[in-house]
Image: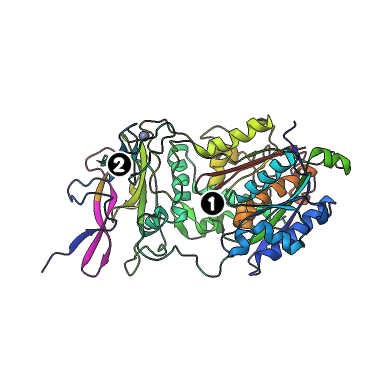
Amino acid sequence: MSGEVAILGVGMHPWGKWGRNFVEYGVHAARAALADSGVRWQDVQFISGAATMRCGYPGYVAGATFAQALGWQGAQVNTSYAACASGSQALAAARSKILSGECEVALVIGSDTTPKGFLAPAKGYRPDDPDWVRFYMGITNPTYFALYARRRMDLYGATEQDFAAIKVKSAEHGSANPNARYRKKFTMEEVLGSNMVADPLRLFEVCATSDGAAAIVISSLEYARKIGRAKAVRVAAISTVTPRFASSEVEMPDIATDSAAVVEGHSFRASIARKAYEEAGLGPEDVSAAEVYDLASPMELDWCEYLGLCKPGEAEALLRSGATRIGGRIPVNPSGGLACFGEAVPAQALAQVCELTWQLRGEAGPRQVQGAKVGITANQGLFGHASSVIVKR
Amino acid sequence: MTEAKRVPAIEGWYTMDQAQPHLLGSRCTSCGTYFFPKQKQFCRNPACEGTAFDDVPLSRTGRIWSYTNASYQPPEPYVSPDPFVPFAIAAVELEKERMIVLGQVVSGTGVEKLRVGMPMELVLETLHKEGETDKVIWKWKPLAGARS
Ligand SMILES: [Zn+2]
């Protein structure tokens, strides 16, 4: 298809809590991706950075910050911000530049460093800010994850054991990933023995915040052919859709959903992958592996359904059948997911694409999904940012 | 002994009628869509360019969409009693407005007493004290006499 671009190289800086500058991780990941691609930095025509809001001005202009760090060479530049979906938007910007014929080869980078101490909401009495209101009422981030988990328990018979089993599975997958921050394997007893945070969510089922970086070199198919990489893994689709009114999902940080009294309600999360599948001309039945947004372990079940890997209400059965583990029919989060990485906001959507690229090349080592041909990612940025990327070979 | 002064924790979001409190939303005069918190400037229905809104009290009963609790003390600006007391949280779907509204569940009602689909009603309860003043917020309470 004419809308495709080639992934020439991928690279990461290992996730962790290193306490260093985000530029350092970004450059490390960029150099790794460039080395993997065989493209010289001087030949990159477009650099696309995913912004971080935690590192001052250099973070707001991340694209230029990385370009300067790698050495100014005159490339065109872009910086994208879309919360947790920033990486996909930076990738989409680079793809558009290539597909429009404005450039042939581009470098995409996302990197973050965790703030020191607790990141509290701004002080004062600010009732016009929904984020302030919900914290004032004691509604924290895990509240939202827990609401979805509890609903599955009451509607579909999900159990605490199911949620713990997802964490155990992710940890098992991630234990074989050199870029993962947490490589310890967990037992059901350990997960179920961890403290309740927001019933039914337990501490070991909620992801952490990490330092980390990921980078990707993409090019036109023509350029890939020219340098002998005609068989490179391709980006087949990028979905960056916004919700449709009335959005019927309870979304952080909102205190209420849209009203569907006049206009019919829509599921934003289900619409994310629909757009990606349409664009790629593929369907859930074609998917070999998925990387999904597991801020909390139970959310993997919801994403299996939003991605169409099973019907609504059937994700528990899919999990229990073993289909979603490596070696199963449709492995989910072979990288270990956010459970093993933790969130590094501008990098995580790109890290998912890195993982699927390794999987499709057959370079994932002990966590290899055999014969992987098509991979899909799902991610969501606060305030209406979707992110789903389909890669294929 | 004087009674503690009761004031809304968030001004203008609900009536202070102790017996039958309502959340206060707004309704687009062009298309009829409800908003909570109040929308005052432009309608968010993409097919509507309405800019005029009526203030409306929202239904004070609905059914549980889901629920959870806060097992740990939330960070500021939440004001915690000392020691912290865990509380349940419910997301309740209002039938007429077809809108889900989050809120704490009344003190003394834990998650073990809640179920998806359970009828709930809106009540007022103290969110925290400020000196001698009770800062009051809306909370969800299992509807008395209703089947759960
Ligand atoms: Zn309207």
Picture coordinates of residue A31, whole percent (x, y): 78, 59
Q: What residue is disc 1 on?
A: A296
Which quadrant of the figure contains the C terminus of chain A?
top right
- Viewer-side residue, A180 vs A379: A379
Q: Residue at x 66, y 43 (%)?
A: A92
Residue with the most extreme left position = B1
Q: Which corner quadrant of the figure contains ligand 1?
A: top left
Q: Residue at x 81, y 56 (%)?
A: A41
Question: Residue B26: which numbered mark, if any?
Answer: 2
Question: Residue A125: which numbered mark, if any?
Answer: none
- Position of B115 with respect to A211 (left or right) is left
Number of numbered markers: 2
Q: The residue under label 2 is which amino acid type?
A: Ser
Picture coordinates of residue A6, whole percent (x, y): 78, 41
- Viewer-side residue, A125 vs B112: A125
Q: Which chain letter matches label 2?
A: B
SS class of the residue under badge 2? strand
Picture coordinates of residue A100, whole percent (x, y): 72, 38
From this viewpoint, is residue A245 visible? yes
Picture coordinates of residue B12, whole percent (x, y): 26, 51
Which quadrant of the figure contains the N terminus of chain A?
top right
- Viewer-side residue, A284 vs A74: A74
Q: Is residue B127 magenta?
A: yes
Which dot, 1 or 2, sits closer to the camera?
2
- Position of B25 with respect to A375 (left or right) is left
Residue with the most extreme front position = A74
- Position of B53 with respect to B132 (left or right) is right
Q: Which residues are magenta?
A: B124-144
Q: Residue at x 82, y 50 (%)?
A: A37
Q: CA distance from mark 1 to mark 2?
A: 34 Å
Mark 2 nearby-residue class (10 Å; few <14, some 14–19, many ≥20) = many
From this viewpoint, is residue A284 visible? no
